[in-house]
Image (cartoon, rainbow, N blue to C red):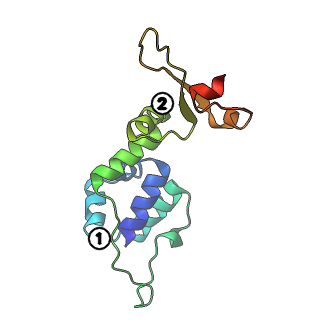
C-alpha cells in the first residue's frame, strides 16, 4: 500500500521512482524494495514528504480491517514510464494525441474537393473555440449554392 501512494506521487510529479530515491540519497534498490512490500523508515518518510511537499501522514496507512485494501496499483512499470514521459514532454503531446485519435484542441474538417482535377480532399483544422463563432457550416456541396 505504501508503494501505491509513493507511485501515485511520482506520477503526479512526473518523475521516475528510481530518480526520487537517488534525489533523497538512497540507492535505486530502495524503490524495488518498496515495490516488494518493504516500508521505509521514519527518516526516509520525512525525506519523501519533503521531496513531494506532503505531510508525513500522507504515507501512513491505517492497518485496521476496514481500511485495508487488496487493490493493487493498476499500471505496469512500462505504463508508468509512458505516463511520466508523456507528461514531462509537452512538445510531443499533440503528436501522441493525433496517433491515438484524440483531437482535443481542434476539429478537422474537409474542404470542398476539386472534382475536375480529381485531387483528394484537403482538410483544415479549426480550433474548438472558433467553431462556435461560425454561423453556417455547409454539410454538402448543395449547401454551398
In depth, the one of 69 and 101 nearer the eye is 101
Question: Element under label 1?
Answer: loop
Residue corresponding to mark 1 = 38
Image quadrant in which you'd find residue 29: bottom left
Return the residue found at the far bottom: 65
Return the residue found at the far top: 117
Neighbour tally class for label 2: few under 14, some 14-19, many 20 plus, Cα within 10 Å? few
Query: Residue drawn at (29%, 70%), measured in percent from left and top?
Result: 38
Relative to 138, say whether 71 is above or below. below
Of the numbered discs 2 and 1, the one sitting upstream in the chain is 1
Give the left or right position of residue 26, taking residue 29 as reference: right
Query: Residue drawn at (33%, 70%), measured in percent from left and top?
Result: 72
Residue 41 in percent (x, y) is at 38, 70
Residue corresponding to mark 2 = 91
Neighbour tally class for label 1: few under 14, some 14-19, many 20 plus, Cα within 10 Å? some
Relative to 78, say whether 67 is above or below. below
Relative to 136, say whether 123 is above or below. above
Query: Which dot marks residue 51?
Result: none
Task: Determine the CA span between mark 2 and mark 1.
Answer: 37 Å
Residue 136 in percent (x, y) is at 71, 32
Query: Residue drawn at (48%, 64%), measured in percent from left and top?
Result: 46
Residue 23 in percent (x, y) is at 41, 48
Amino acid at each position: 500500500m505504501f508503494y501505491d501512494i509513493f507511485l501515485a506521487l511520482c506520477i503526479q510529479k512526473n518523475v521516475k521512482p528510481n530518480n526520487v530515491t537517488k534525489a533523497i540519497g538512497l540507492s535505486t534498490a530502495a524503490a524495488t524494495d518498496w515495490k516488494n512490500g518493504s516500508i521505509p523508515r521514519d527518516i526516509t518518510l520525512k525525506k519523501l514528504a519533503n521531496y513531494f511537499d506532503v505531510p508525513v501522514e500522507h504515507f501512513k496507512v491505517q492497518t485496521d480491517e476496514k481500511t485495508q485494501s487488496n487493490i493493487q496499483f493498476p499500471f505496469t512499470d512500462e505504463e508508468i514510464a509512458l505516463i511520466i514521459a508523456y507528461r514531462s514532454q509537452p512538445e510531443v503531446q499533440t503528436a501522441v494525441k493525433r496517433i491515438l485519435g484524440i483531437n482535443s484542441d481542434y476539429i478537422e474538417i474537409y474542404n470542398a474537393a476539386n472534382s475536375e482535377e480529381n485531387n483528394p480532399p484537403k482538410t483544415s483544422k479549426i480550433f474548438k473555440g472558433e467553431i462556435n463563432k461560425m454561423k453556417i457550416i455547409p454539410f454538402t456541396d448543395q449547401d454551398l449554392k
